[in-house]
Image: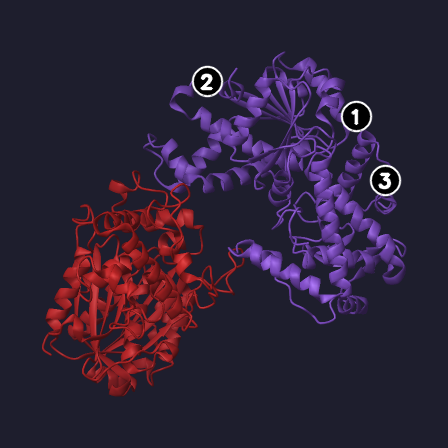
Chain colours: A purple, B red
Amino acid sequence: MTLDERLQNVTIIGAAGKMGSGIAVLVAQEMSKLKLKPENKDKIYRLNLVDITEKALDGLRSYMKVQLVKAAEKSTVLLRQIYVDRKDLIENGEIINAFVDDTYALLNFTTDYNIAKDSHLVFEAIFENEEIKIKVLKQLKEICLPDALFLTNTSSIPISYLDEQAGLGGRIVGYHFYNPPVIQKLVEIIYADNTTEELKEIGLEFGKRLRKKLVPAADISGFIGNGHFSRDGLYAMNKVEELKDEYGYHGALYIMNKVSQDFLVRPMGIFQLIDYVGLDVFQSLLRVMRTHLKLEHLNSDQLNRFMDKKITGGQNPNGSQKDGFIKYEKNRPAGVYNIEEGKYRMFDEDWRAEIDKKLNPTNEKFAPWRALLMDGKKMEKLETHFNNLKGMDTYGSTLALDFLKTTKEIGENLVKNGVANSEKEVNEVLMNGFFWLYGPIHNFI
Amino acid sequence: MTYFRKKIYATAGFNTVSLGTGRKEFHPKKPRPGIEHYIKEAGLGSINQIQNPENIDEGVIGNFMAARFCNQGNLGGFFPMVHPTFQYKPCIRVEGACDSGGLALATAIKTILADMADVVMCIGVEVQNSVKAIYGADYLAGADWFSGNRKKGHVYFFPDLFSRRAGACYEKFGNEKVREGMAHWYVNAIENARKNPDAQEYHNKNSDLLATGMTSPNPKAFCEHINVFDCSKVSDGGSALIFASEEGLKKIGVELKDAVEVISYAQVQDNLTTPPPDLTKLSTCAVAAKRAYDRAEIKSSDLSVLDVHDCFTIAGLLAVEAAGVAGYGEGADFITDGNTKSDGIIPTNTTGGLVGYGHPTGASGVRQAIDVVKQLLGKAGDCQVKISPDKPFGMMSSMGGNDKTVVAMIFRKE
């Protein structure tokens, strides 16, 4: 069965979630473009969007409308060609609306898994919990057609394990989108031991159609992206434990967040990133990796204490950032949590200026990530920046260079341990999935 | 000069900031001033330079598409907002696509020549940031023959029309040469805009403008032969200029030294339903320029300053040819060699032009006239170029549609 044929009936499980909803937008557009080909006009296309509550589905309906309009606005050059024979559609606005309506008409929103019974392709994008994932996959195996193929968006659970537990006989592939899937170019593709050749081909072809950058990762828990992120985050948390006596928990958190953002020129600090992903997601990631890799050190008491206090980060339904390690005002960091005091310490207090001075006594100005993003000479500028750090010998530069070295080692170990085929792939994942300006494996140090 | 039956002067020009992407104060999601604000701001800016605003007899408002961008018609109704004494005075709105401002100038002059008024305030205005560019492209497509051409046109309808012109020029005169000329047009536009605090590109800090200008086109997302930097801006803005007879100047308390004489203009209309006869020429602009020169009894080499309608860099390139300052097919080299720069043979678009200042469509023609007038008066601030006494002439040429509606106007400082 070809990809075109399989795209006639698709189901997304967990479609109202952060990842599922983005995948839904991408899949819906591809299906709609197929449906709009003259030769397919009499065929029925259905994209089933399944989630557990009606409320979540209502949120998904609004999200789909907004995102489909945005997507159509970006592909109007193509849409004008698709609708070239529709004499009634003249203006861009009319064409965009027609595409959104035509695409929306393919969607079924439901809480009933049984709708997947006619699907040839099923995307699984539920919460990262292996018991639930296995249970759902088992259920789907019973419901779906015997040749249905499954693409799981797990970010850490070995695909062979899911295959074996759910009894899918190789009809599953890891297809790990990055958040938000509509924007992020990266998809990690992970084959289970038994993934069928057909599914491998389908995965590659679909990625090409979505114009995603597919990077293969070995079927080792955490894969490349989270294999790096988890260890990078743990390094920062462990460092906080080291620094807390001198600066307090809040000061230590602030230091590591600032060093990773400003000194390492990343889009956001390490703790802001964990907040964005969600402390709950990060904790669950560590749990999965700890279990499958049998590495006890992949754990953080500090993180567990935050979770005990129900401080989870992540986003509110309206997309705004929830508080986590950091407190946010208008989606911008405004303070950091002190776990011992049980409260946020705000940036406008005196402690911050003292730390800033300690980190960077000469008040060196670093080009921020955003300024270098579109700069054609960014690699040269980064090299100069890191050379400057090496020459500075300040508290901040020392912390930064240690972090940079660790980050590099984490990347190198991913290659050494066979998670990534090459250094290039590690760098591609961090640069495309995490928006880093440079890969962790570099020659800066 | 004998072309007009009496002397006509222009004075007290005022341009608002051209607001849109590029300006630090612009944020697409924050509320912005409406069209009435720009009419009032521009009008008051002009009034502040004269003694007796109550003696302004009439208003003309040039605007292209407020009906779609702002859901607003009857723009003449905003004229009395500008000054209390304008209540119950005549005001007319004129439209000729991106040459609406040019038509407003012509209308003001005709009113004075007809002895219906001694002083006419001419205001050009447009607010375009009310919708995303992808929808604005449809509104702007109304400058061409909509029912005949829109359906078969490109997403970005007008950029594509001029992209085709660029493509035709690449083929005829050499890709590299023309592309380079367009990129140098862009560089000159931004460099001039950096001297003009009202320009949309005033805050542009790009250190390698030529490389940006040379960016390869991306047909999948935009047009085949031009890049986004080849385009003028999506802009909100207004411009106001006062025209007066000799007696009118006295009435509003403006001395002759603060005014510039309009010595000729040509208003030329081509058939909207026919395709351009030659994509490598702005034929209508050329007719307008020739008539304006003939009526003024001057040659292109008599000009000290020129302002042309560079809605796209290729339009700028073809416009200097149409204005006769560069020969046919020689525009690219003429620009690349620096002849249109502020210290060049013929300083062109000295305040940034449509690419650098911005292109609030209905205001552009008025803005062009104002900037030429300011240059001739020596009041162009950091943008001032040398006006030699033996060449006291400046010309503006404003174009609507794909070289369909053109006004070329020549000014002289006595």
A193 left or right, relative to A69:
right
Which residue is disc 2 drawn over? A43
Q: What amino acid is at disc 3?
A: His
The residue indicated by pointer 3 is: A297
Q: Residue A357 versus residue A86: which sits nearer the camera?
A: A357
Closer to us: A3 or A194 = A194
Give percent across and percent down for residue A328: 72, 55
Between circles 1 and 2, the one closer to the viewer is 1
**Quarter location, residue A300:** top right
| Lower position in the chain sequence, tag 1 or tag 3 | 1
Who comes first in sequence, dot 2 or dot 3? 2
- Helix, strand, or loop for circle 3? loop
Q: Chain of mark 2?
A: A
**Tag 2, which secondary structure?**
loop
**Which chain does tag 1 point to?**
A
Count of numbered badges drawn on the protein: 3
The location of residue B32, given as percent across then percent down, is: 49, 61
Real-space Cα separation, disc 1 to disc 3, in angstroms = 22 Å
At mark 1, the secondary structure is: helix
Could one spot residue B59 in this view of the protein?
no
What is the CA distance from the residue labelled 2 to the residue labelled 3?
54 Å
Q: Quadrant of the C terminus of chain A?
A: bottom right
Does residue B25 lie above or below A88 as drawn? below
Disc 2: CA contacts within 10 A as few (<14), some (14-19) or many (>=20): few
Q: In the image, which disc is placed on residue B289?
A: none
Q: Are marks 2 and 3 on the same chain?
A: yes
| Residue name at image x 28 percent, y 48 percent | B161
- Determine whether label 2 and label 3 are within 8 Å by CB: no
Q: Which residue is mark 1?
A: A131
Q: Amino acid at mark 2?
A: Lys
For the question of whether residue B338 can be seen, the reply is yes
